[in-house]
């Protein structure tokens, strides 16, 4: 039986988040996720009964990546959560390594047992520590600690998305987790401007569609988006100070690609 994966889209753009913001990448967006964050910016890649994906085999994915590879820094495996489809990825990565394509894994850092199967072939890891108060999902501290213990041998950085609901207790727990592995791991605090997106735009089912929103919607209920932004930015600056008390490299950076209306 031919090995396939559920792929939402493959495209070339710039990395808009974190330590490598601004570099050109080929993005392979895997369909499905093991979490349901309330502020998810790619609901098109979540498996909630939709079919916003294509079943692609190894050679098809590799061929599409190769066609877009010129002048790129790395190949970003993103989602959704790529490690939901680890069996496919562990067969895809050797093809990329032989072609000289560095692999950039974007992950929530929960599926550490699956990560162990591919860690040797991954070059860069963008690990998203989810604050339960921010995501409105349960905590995964133990799983993420196990993941980070393996990832620290690679070029890894942490991303923490902060919403208006993010609690200081959660950021303290995240700092304990990271510092317990290495104080040298960079942490990117990312402001989330969209609080509890009950009116989140839905996909029309087109494979290559990306979710698009203006930077500042006028209002959300009785609260203006400017007010939300002010709360979030204040939290980000406060949390940066908390993190810097124990970690060496902590930055506050937004999603830069959103400001340029890019995927």
Image (cartoon, grey):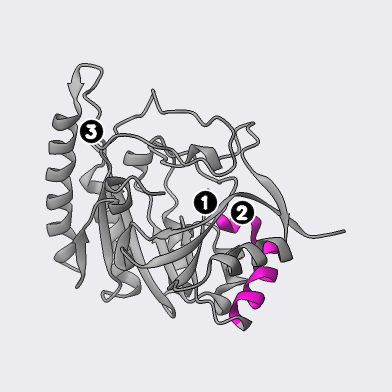
Which sits in the foreground, 219 or 109? 219
Structural crowding at the residue carrying mark 1, measured as other residues with C-alpha within 10 Å and reported as few (<14), some (14–19) or many (≥20) = many
List x then y, in percent, for residue 227. Answer: 14, 30
CA gap, disc 3 and disc 1? 24 Å
Secondary structure beneath dot 1 equals loop
Q: Specify the quadrant of the image occupied by residue 127.
A: bottom left
Residue under pointer 2? 84
Q: Residue furthest top?
A: 222
Q: Work out whether residue 61 can be spotted.
A: yes
Q: Give how far apart the Cα atoms at labels 2 and 3 are.
A: 33 Å
Mark positioned earlier in the residue sequence (2 or 3): 2
Left or right for 41, reference 60: left
**Label 2: which secondary element:** helix
* Mark 3 / mark 1, whichever is N-terminal: 1
**Segment colored magenta:** 80-97
- Dots 1 and 2: beta carbons under 8 Å? yes
Q: Which mark is residue 119?
A: none
Mark 3 near mark 1, Cβ–Cβ under 8 Å?
Answer: no
Q: Secondary structure at mark 3?
A: loop
Question: Relative to 86, is 214 on the left or the right?
Answer: left
Q: Which residue is mark 3?
A: 216
Give 154 or 59, whichever is nearer the viewer: 59
* Horizontal side of residue 146 vs 88, given as left or right: left
**Residue 146 shows up from this direction:** no
Q: Position of residue 13 (x, y in %)?
A: 42, 58
**Crowd class of label 2 (few under 14; some 14 to 19; many from 20; radius 10 Å):** some
The disc at residue 79 is: 1
- The residue at 56%/56% (across/down) is 82
Closer mark to the observer between disc 2 and disc 3: 3
- Which is more toward the observer, 144 or 232? 232
Above or below — where is 54 with respect to 65? Answer: above
The question of residue 73 being in magenta is answered with: no
């Amino acid at each position: 039986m031919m090995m396939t994966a559920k792929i939402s889209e493959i495209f070339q753009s710039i990395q808009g988040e974190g330590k490598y913001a601004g570099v050109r990448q080929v993005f392979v967006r895997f369909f499905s996720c093991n979490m349901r964050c309330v502020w998810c910016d790619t609901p098109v890649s979540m498996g909630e009964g939709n079919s916003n994906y294509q079943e692609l085999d190894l050679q098809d994915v590799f061929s599409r990546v190769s066609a877009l590879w010129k002048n790129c820094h790395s190949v970003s495996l993103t989602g959704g959560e790529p490690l939901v489809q680890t069996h496919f990825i562990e067969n895809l990565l050797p093809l990329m390594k032989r072609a000289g394509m560095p692999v950039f894994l974007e992950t929530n850092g929960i599926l550490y047992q699956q990560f162990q199967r591919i860690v040797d072939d991954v070059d860069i890891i963008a690990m998203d520590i989810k604050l339960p108060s921010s995501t409105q999902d349960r905590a995964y501290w133990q799983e993420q600690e196990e993941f980070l213990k393996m990832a620290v041998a690679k070029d890894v950085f942490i991303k923490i998305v902060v919403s208006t609901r993010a609690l200081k207790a959660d950021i303290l727990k995240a700092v304990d987790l990271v510092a317990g592995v290495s104080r040298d791991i960079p942490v990117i605090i990312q402001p989330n401007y969209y609080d509890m997106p009950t009116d989140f735009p839905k996909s029309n089912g087109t494979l290559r569609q990306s979710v698009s929103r203006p930077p500042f919607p006028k209002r959300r209920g009785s609260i203006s988006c400017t007010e939300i932004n002010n709360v979030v930015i204040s939290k980000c600056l406060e949390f940066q100070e908390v993190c810097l008390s124990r970690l060496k490299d902590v930055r506050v950076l937004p999603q830069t690609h959103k400001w340029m209306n890019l995927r």
